[in-house]
Amino acid sequence: MQELKKDLYLIDKAELLQVIMEKKNALWRLCQICCSYPKAEKHYEITYSFANGYEFANYRLVVEREEEVPSISRVYKSAIYYENEMHELWGLNVDNIKVDMHDKLYRIDVETPFLEKEGE
């Protein structure tokens, strides 16, 4: 784990579930999960944000386009919506979501509308 700035830590995929369990066991709540795909970088950046009272902590995971990210929905049930959204809108491969909505979370006509296609 590397601290990028105050309350923002870069983690790798092997650390994700350990960090999630530490936060859950310490009674931190999941505030949000944010996904982005900077076109120039060609990878996903997923940020998991937690709060405990007035304390906040953000953990950023960077993965390649075709990599799978383990689901945290079995630990934090609210992650079901974030993970389905990241898959449907961004095309992020999330492994083993507790409730997979199979791209039916939103009524959209375009597949992965937030992910710019190659050559665009």
Image (tube, grey):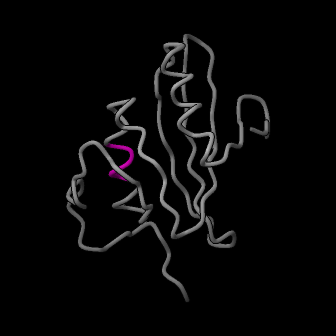
| The stretch drawn in magenta includes residue 10 | no
- Considering depth in this image, is 34 or 43 the residue closer to the camera? 43
- Quarter of the figure with residue 98: top left
Q: Residue at 71% of width from left, 37% of height from top?
A: 9
* Res 120 seen here: no
Question: Residue 34: percent from the left, percent from the top?
Answer: 51, 46
Q: Quadrant of the C terminus?
A: bottom right
Q: Left of 77 or right of it: where is 7? A: right
* Res 76 seen here: yes
Q: Residue at 61% of width from left, 45% of height from top?
A: 14
Question: Residue 11: percent from the left, percent from the top?
Answer: 68, 43
Look at the picture and state if 45 lies above or below 16: below
Q: Left of 85 or right of it: where is 13? A: right
Look at the picture and state if 86 lies above or below 120: above
Q: Residue at 32% of width from left, 47% of height from top?
A: 97
Q: Residue at 49% of width from left, 13% of height from top?
A: 27
Question: Residue 106: percent from the left, percent from the top?
Answer: 24, 56
Look at the picture and state if 70 lies above or below 64: above
Query: How many labels sit on residues?
Result: 0
Question: Residue 19: percent from the left, percent from the top?
Answer: 59, 31
Task: Look at the magenta stretch and give its main secondary structure.
Answer: helix
Q: Left of 108 or right of it: where is 117? A: right
- Taking the view exactly as shown, the residue that stands out farthest to the top is 53
Look at the picture and state if 104 lies above or below 109: above
Q: Left of 101 or right of it: where is 55? A: right
- Considering depth in this image, is 63 or 91 the residue closer to the camera? 63
- Considering depth in this image, is 69 or 91 the residue closer to the camera? 69
Q: Quadrant of the N terminus?
A: top right
Q: In this picture, which residue range is highlighted in magenta?
A: 81-85
